Amino acid sequence: MNNLKVRHVPVLVNEVLSGLNVNLAPLKSQEIVDTKKYIDATVGAGGHTIEIVKRGGRVLGIDADPKMIEVARENLEFALRAGMPSGLDTCPTDNPDGCYTLICGNFREIYSIAQERGFNEVEGILFDLGISSLHYGFPRGFSFKNPDAPLDMRFNDQKQGVTAAMLLSALGIHDLEKMFAEVMPVYLSRKISVSIIEERRSKKIETVGDFIEILDKAGIKRKKSKFIGSISYSTLPFLALRLAVNNELESISIALPKAFSLLKSGGRMAVISFHSGEDKQVKNYFQTLVSSEKANIIYKKLIRPAQSEIGSNPRARSAKLRVLEKI
């Protein structure tokens, strides 16, 4: 799994550290550690968690995908135990295992998971929504680049029963339209839904290739979308399916209030979103807290990656960061 460490690049690292009030300078081994507690609600491959731990924080990392917990653990052990020649990548405590705790679970369960691990009053919480770039290499149907892969899209096949193929085979046309309309114009959602209904009359929908064929028949080509810059229209149906399979939008609405309740006074919540549906939920919830005088917005303007970051990490192109502070 060593190649995974090389391929993973966390998004908006310095902006997240600054937003969460984490010291931007990594600790030296001889410095006193301030063991402030943070929760990385979407730990992924561990990139953000590594940077927080290097600066003296203790992190509870949560991820719904057991494979990503495995990746995060290996990356953390490599960065904090093996270290780098500069000495900046070693754990700033004598006990690397005490720097972080990794739990496989959905972030909608963040409150109970945090309470059980003693993270009930924390300095900061991060949500990096969406999926890790590593997911596109997993044979679960997250990307159209592997036509032979099963159309699955579940984060955890041990806890989730319904696959993307099952949804396409069972949903009625109105439910299909509603699902795709979460991320696409209504007229395109309608075309895709009609194509799905027609296709499943003659064959089973089982693989990524089957879904690509449906999109081709619906006229959804790999042209750039004027709605989201460089992401093609053919990417959007895959996004809509993944959101539905994993109940991601519903989970966000459930998780944000629970996460806010875990913050200490002066604690901060940072959320990175990658499409308008996610960002709308975050924005509306943050505004509700501000209106009720429970929180303040840290960045008045939406934080986006610099062009230099997008150039080195194309995944960052759609990222949007919002941060608030609990009063």
Image (spheres, rainbow, N blue to C red):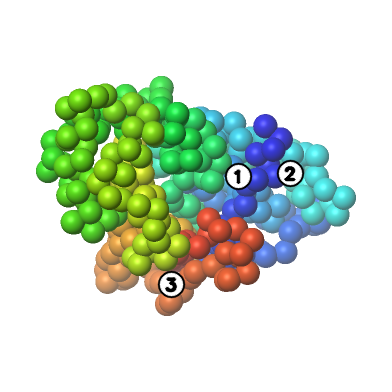
Q: Amino acid at mark 1?
A: Gly
| Towards the viewer: 319 or 159 | 319
Residue at image position (24%, 24%) is 203
Question: Helix, strand or loop at disc 3?
Answer: loop
| Towards the viewer: 38 or 75 | 75
Query: The N terminus is located in which quarter?
Result: top right
Residue at image position (43%, 72%) is 302
Marks 1 and 3 sit apart, C-alpha to C-alpha, by: 24 Å
- Callout 2 touching callout 1 (CB < 8 Å): yes
Q: Which residue is mark 2?
A: 79
Q: Amino acid at mark 2?
A: Ala
Mark 1 Cα shell of 10 Å, populated few (<14), some (14-19), many (≥20) = many
- In the displayed structure, does residue 318 sit left or right of residue 69? left
Marks 2 and 3 sit apart, C-alpha to C-alpha, by: 31 Å
In the picture, the disc for residue 77 is none
Precedes in sequence: disc 2 or disc 3? 2
Question: Helix, strand or loop at disc 1?
Answer: loop
Q: Work out whether residue 130 can be spotted.
A: yes
* Residue lying farthest to the right in this orientation: 85
- Residue 71: image location, x then y, percent: 61, 35
- Residue 199: image location, x then y, percent: 22, 32
Residue at image position (23%, 59%) is 185
- Residue 292: image location, x then y, percent: 27, 68
Residue at image position (42%, 77%) is 300
Mark 3 Cα shell of 10 Å, populated few (<14), some (14-19), many (≥20) = few
Q: Which residue is mark 1?
A: 46
Q: Amino acid at mark 3?
A: Leu
Locate residue 216: give its quadrant.
Answer: top left
Marks 2 and 1 sit apart, C-alpha to C-alpha, by: 10 Å
In the picture, the disc for residue 302 is 3
Precedes in sequence: disc 2 or disc 1? 1
- In the displayed structure, does residue 158 sit left or right of residue 181? right
